[in-house]
Image (spheres, coloured by chain):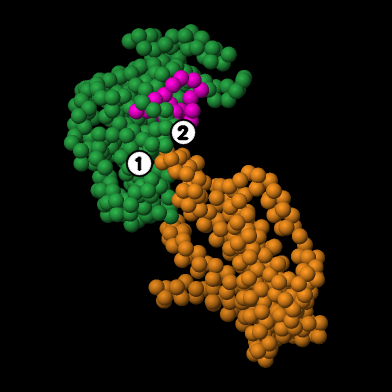
Amino acid sequence: MSASASPNPSAAPGGGQGPSVVEAAGIGKVFGEGAAAVAALEAVDLTIRQGEFVSLIGPSGCGKSTLLRIIGDLTAPTSGTIAINGKPAARARLDRDYGMVFQAPVLMDWRTVAKNIELPLEIMGYPADERRRRSKELLELVELGTFADRHPWQLSGGMQQRVAIARALSFDPKLLLMDEPFGALDEMTRERMNTELMRIWQRTGTTIVFVTHSIPEAVFLSTRVVVMSARPGRISQVVDIDLPGDRSFATRESDAYFRLVTKVREALRHDDPADGGPTGADGAAPSTSDAERVRAEGLA
Amino acid sequence: MKASALRDALPAIAVFVAVLVVWEISFLLLGVQSFLIPRPTVIAASLADQWPTLVKGVLFTGTEAILGLLVGLVLGTAAGFATARWVSAREVLLPVAIGASTIPIIAFAPITLNWFGPESLLPRITIVAVMVFFPVMVNTIRGLTNVDPGALELLSSYAAGDGQTLLKLRGPNALPYWFTALRIATTLAVIGAVVGEFFGGPLYALGLYITNMTGSSRYPAAWAAIVLACALGIVLYLLAVALERVVMPWNAAREAAR
């Protein structure tokens, strides 16, 4: 594992310039059929480069989780193409390119913390001593070294989520997909987990796609924030986060941080019809009539 | 550890002793006839008196119960696995299993005697296996299929095969369900064996002994056999609990933490 790698070079503003890890073009997803069909995503184009930390943010029902699940091959798009490291998503999954962290930690109660982290390694056929070496290393990385032999129910929610992150990193996946991983945690724990995730990302250099409801969280963590709008779900704006790579609690009190939080908040509001509808500012938000037209085509 | 276990069991022991004492004294004072329910001391005397015959009976009936239990566990678990794995097996096996579970044991027991002869263990083994099969199968299916969808997605993201998913997720997930079935099955096994013996078997078999003693108005002896049948059921149940602790130590610890 690359936990000992040098600080992430692409933590610089604007994200990575490396090869593209995710290449999504014209992604659409329709749930249901006929009159009951609901367009969850429409015409989503997104390229994520190696070493980036990209957050997907938007109101409930904007399809951000669906987009993440399409990237991770947990569900197939209705239209469009997706390539992960130049391969179809299904191939990437079979090649074990993905590490996944969900909102629930999904730990196995019958396994100790260390054995939970070793689960993917067991499935992938790593030898026992290698498994133990890695779980030990990862427990140190998430600062749970003394909890190796505990069982999941003996840990707090934040600690359980750290185990889930360690498990996802255990086999050095090329891409870490996180679906509101800190959504169930209290605000204090969440901020601490954000700082910790930041540190882990900088040490490992893993490309991360991160779904969240929280604007501060998205701004603090990301190199880019992808703002999505609902019904149908589409990308309305992409905000580059040009904060320094080395972020800490102090970052949350800087003017640049507040400016970016405001920018993301406004991008989200632009596209809420209750706030006067999309204005098309920055040339990114689609007009309602456009969205309606595309949606009608999607249903046809 | 030992001392604290004893302390935990103390209230139950105290209640048990109190019930015996109240039973003994009140029945003595009220002059309740022994064909209704004999007093504990009368049952105990009969237990001592009939001990050699009763021990043979317990061993015989216990063997039937345990062998029937094992057959039912193996078949029920196998059917549960097959049903959880293949939809076609579900369509074939589930109606058969439901049918088997609704067989009236009272009607079925005499027929098994015709199949195997009254002296054989096989009639009661068959009855016990049929009774045990259904709860074991149903709980196995439930345990194998009632899995956290998130965990399935996680294993899918590791590109785990069906065999690995069974071994690492569905199997361990099914264990608590299976042990619940085992607990139910142990008590069913003794009931099945004793009821099966009502219709035939060696004279010392507990079920036949109880009917014979009742028939010849020797109620304390019948009750002594009933007490031993209960004791047999309790022992099997406790063995199941002990096995559960050995196989799933984490489960007991988790329960205790709640």
Counting from the top left corner in percent of width and height, residue A18 is at 25, 24
Of the 4 image quadrants, the one containing the N terminus of chain A is top left
Vertical placement of residue B49 versus A235, above or below: below
Dot 2: element: loop
Q: Residue at x 58, y 71 (%)?
A: B236
Q: Which residues are magenta?
A: A66-85
In the image, the chain rendered in orange is B
Q: Residue at x 41, y 24 (%)?
A: A82
Q: Earlier in the sequence, mark 1 or mark 2?
A: 2
Mark 2 — on which chain does it sit?
Answer: A
In reply to whether residue A67 is colored magenta, the answer given is yes
Quadrant of the rendered image containing residue A178:
top left
Q: How many marks?
A: 2
| Residue for badge 1 | A168
| Residue for badge 2 | A74
In the image, the chain rendered in green is A
Dot 1: element: helix
Mark 1 — on which chain does it sit?
Answer: A
Question: Cα distance, mark 1 to mark 2?
Answer: 16 Å
> Disc 1 marks which amino acid?
Ala
Counting from the top left corner in percent of width and height, residue B93 is at 68, 51
Quadrant of the rendered image containing residue B77:
bottom right
> Disc 2 marks which amino acid?
Leu
Q: Residue at x 77, y 76 (%)?
A: B118
Q: Mark 1: few, some, or many residues within 10 Å (few <14, many ≥20)?
A: many
